[in-house]
Every structure is written in C-alpha cells, then in structure tokens.
Image (cartoon, grey):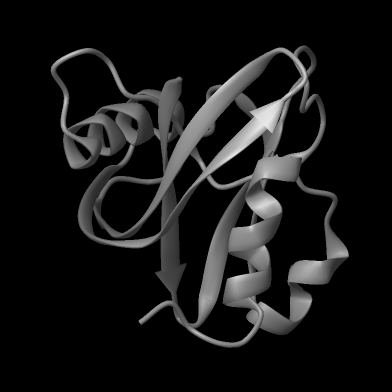
Amino acid sequence: MIKVVAAVIEKDGRYLLCKRGPGGNCAFLWEFPGGKIEEGEAPNEALIREIREELCIEILPSTVFCEYPYSYPDKDIYFYFIRAQIISGEINPLFHSEIRWLLPEELDSLDYCPADLSTVEKLKGGRAQ
C-alpha cells in the first residue's frame, strides 16, 4: 500500500486547496497538497519535503487531522492528513494549476479527488483545531 501525506493548512479561518493539472485519476480535481512518503521518511518529514517541492513554502506540521485508507481503481493508498502552518515563503504552485483559500462553508464549491472527500466533510463542520 502506498502511503501519502497531505497538508491541512488553515490561515484566517480558510483552508488551502490546490487544483491538479492533467494526468492521472484526479486530473483537474481539487486536493489538499502533499505526496508520497518515501522509504525511511516519517509522515511529517515527507509533508515538509512535498510542500517545499510543490508550493515553494516552508511549513510546520503539527498533528494528524485524520487518516484512512482509500482504494483507487489502480492502487491502494493510506492517507495522513496533517495539520500544518506556513512559517515562511510565498506560495508558488509548481504542479497545480490553481490554488484557493476557502472558508468551511465554501468547501462545497469545488470538485475534489475522491480520497479527499472525507477530510473535506470533516472540515465543513468548522476549523481543524
């Protein structure tokens, strides 16, 4: 099973969402930014690396907001959605076509990767404290 981390980044009551580009199961769908955990990496280490590579910012991960397995048609993935805050840098999305900061009540306005939907539902009730 592939292990993946994703950042639940909140700022001023809004959550950061990123739109994927072309290719793969989730082309042009929205997601929480992150990526695969490499062998020997802890989830928090992987999240720091992935966010640096994808968005050119430095983050400080804190606790796991939620975690669960998800099966796509071609692979099984175990997701860790980790709370994090931006500590430096300006967001520059290198692999995403768009980013948005949304309030919990605005989260229904986007089409998400299927694996992210449970996390979105959890956030709609309020802040990820």
Is residue 1 placed above or below 116 in the rendered structure? above
- The foreground one among 99 and 44 is 44
- The foreground one among 57 and 77 is 77
Is residue 13 placed above or below 101 in the rendered structure? below
Is residue 18 placed above or below 74 in the rendered structure? below
Residue 38: give x, y in percent of width and height: 27, 15
The image quadrant where one finds the N terminus is top left
Q: From this viewpoint, which residue is outermost toward the bottom?
A: 126
- The foreground one among 10 and 78 is 78
Please state if 68 lies on the left or on the right of 74 as rendered. left
- The image quadrant of residue 102 is bottom right
Please state if 111 lies on the left or on the right of 71 as rendered. right
- The image quadrant of residue 63 is bottom left
- The foreground one among 34 and 101 is 34
What residue is drawn where x is 61% and y is 52%?
17
Residue 5: give x, y in percent of width and height: 39, 38
- The image quadrant of residue 27 is top right
Q: Answer whether residue 41 is visible to the viewer in this image.
A: yes
Q: Answer whether residue 101 is visible to the viewer in this image.
A: no
Count of numbered labels shown in the rendering: 0
The image quadrant where one finds the C terminus is bottom left
What residue is drawn where x is 58% and y is 23%?
76
Residue 93: give x, y in percent of width and height: 54, 33
Residue 66: give x, y in percent of width and height: 43, 60
Is residue 107 placed above or below 33 in the rendered structure? below
Please state if 67 lies on the left or on the right of 83 as rendered. right
